[in-house]
Image: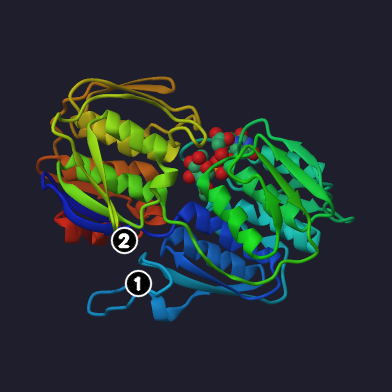
Amino acid sequence: MDKLIIQGGVPLHGEVIISGAKNAALPILLASILVDEPIVFHNVPHLRDINTTLNLLSILGCEAKFDERYLPPVPGRTVAAPAEHPGSGGVVRTQPCRLSHEAPYDLVKTMRASVLCLGPLLARLGKAKVALPGGCAIGARPVNLHLSALEKMGAEFELDEGYIYGKCPNGLKGAHINFDFPTVGGTENLLMAATLAAGETILENAAREPEVVDLAKFLIACGADISGHGSSIIKIKGVPRLKGTSYSIMPDRIEAGTFMIAAAITDGELLIKNCPIQDMEAVVLKLMDMGVKFEPKPDGILVSRDSHGLRGTEIKTQPHPGFPTDMQAQIMALMCTANGPSLVEESIFENRFMHVLELVRMGADIRLSGHTALVKGSSCLKGAPVMASDLRASASLVLAGLAAGGQTEIQRIYHLDRGYERMEEKLIPVGARIKRVKE
Ligand code: UD1
């Protein structure tokens, strides 16, 4: 297992290029199941979860792999990014063969998003056997909303021996669905299923996340008839088939937000390139509130502290366009170093404060009470050995380590590799003293 060792206290200066968004790439790649022609995807991040998705697609009969000409640079080898986009950009090609309806536990257990193959399989094959994604470190995360919505479209489900068995012998039919909660994955599963269903589907209280919008844009590029994406009511008129296309995945707003905080927490200055700032209003406003400065430049956004020092603030995580739960752990690291207290309320996941105890080990003063964390601020963070517990918690520990005096050792960084493309390789050129070592 790898770990990261950081010698903190160095202000970061330079440029960082944001990669393609993991949370957009996962559903969009799985949507290939709906299409019976080859597809080319650009700006695909090189991440563990993406490799899992490509394996899953291949097992389901849709051959999917990175184009080797655009593999990430390795020491001693330089590879140019494809001309079509400015990111570090992987290119993935998918080629449908004979589809299978079975998504095995070995793959699904490592990545909850695998459940997003359920809607496409039902739409294409009329049946699906998908392992139930187990519990996950940040909460129970059931899929009841996905299943009940698909049932409204005519699907029937049985749960047996850890698998979801789904079938719709008469095909999926358009339906009017009102989600109890604007679930991101549920909206994506239904969006995909409805593109090939008979008639019109209306999704009410749908998720408005930019990654849902990117999925809708991809499906439209393949010939789907979708309107209202980005609002809470999405209308989908089923079409008989979808055609192949070439599509570039949107940049990752969570990675961009993490590097914005890296600039602020180290009192440095970073030019964030390929930054989807238009999708980051809640994060940018809160960071400005805390004393972070944003200057638009022709080739990116320059991020630094303003002249008044960092201040505390209050956040409550909410569905988009509210403050994203996926940025909660990272902004909490910044709050630890701000002058004055901050308050964090987590309203999306019930168990998403596992970074708190690790931050406390680094000298932070944080009081937890149910879904709320009171961050006292003004902490002089000190390096310590810490343990990553989930993806965004890992990022928060990297940020704290960059700001802390002395050495921080972060174990279990396989969590980080699920969602950040070569994070240390992006940090080293901007001055961070960080290295990956084998334990
Ligand atoms: C997606 C993101 C994840 C992000 C989350 C919220 C991907 C691959 N992952 O996860 O990074 O943190 O959105 O922005 O895009 N719920 C139910 N029943 C359901 C579905 C969800 O109770 O059927 C609950 C979940 O347990 C959770 C909340 O709803 O508490 C949010 O889940 P959801 O919006 O579905 O998030 P994901 O799609 O899992």
Cβ of mark 1 under 8 Å from ligand 1: the answer is no
- Residue displayed at 49% across by 52% down: 23
Task: Name the residue nearer the viewer: 159 or 99.
Answer: 99
Q: Point out residue 98 in the picture as x, y percentages from the top left corner.
A: 72, 75
Residue 429 sits above or below residue 5 on the image? below
Residue type marked 2: Arg
Label 1 to label 2: alpha-carbon separation: 9 Å
- Residue displayed at 48% across by 65% down: 51
Helix, strand, or loop for circle 2?
Answer: loop
Horizontal side of 79 relative to 232 (left or right) equals left
Circles 1 and 2: CB atoms closer than 8 Å: yes
- Residue displayed at 21% across by 24% down: 377
What is the quadrant of residue 151 in the picture? top right
Quadrant in which the N terminus is drawn: bottom left
Graded by Cα atoms within 10 Å as few (under 14), some (14 to 19) or many (20 or more), the crowding at tag 1 reads some
Helix, strand, or loop for circle 1?
Answer: loop
Task: Name the residue nearer the viewer: 121 or 436.
Answer: 121
Ligand 1 - quadrant of the structure image: top right
Q: Point out residue 349 in the picture as x, y percentages from the top left corner.
A: 49, 32
- Which residue of the protein is positioned furthest toward the top in this rendering? 369
Mark number displayed over residue 287: none
Q: Point out residue 432 in the picture as x, y percentages from the top left corner.
A: 16, 54
Q: Point out residue 134 in the picture as x, y percentages from the top left corner.
A: 57, 45
Instruction: Count the marks.
Output: 2
Q: Tell me the residue that label 2 is attached to.
A: 422
Q: Earlier in the sequence, mark 1 or mark 2?
A: 1
Residue 308 sits above or below residue 107 on the image? above
Say whether residue 355 is visible: no
Q: Tell me the residue that label 1 is attached to.
A: 72
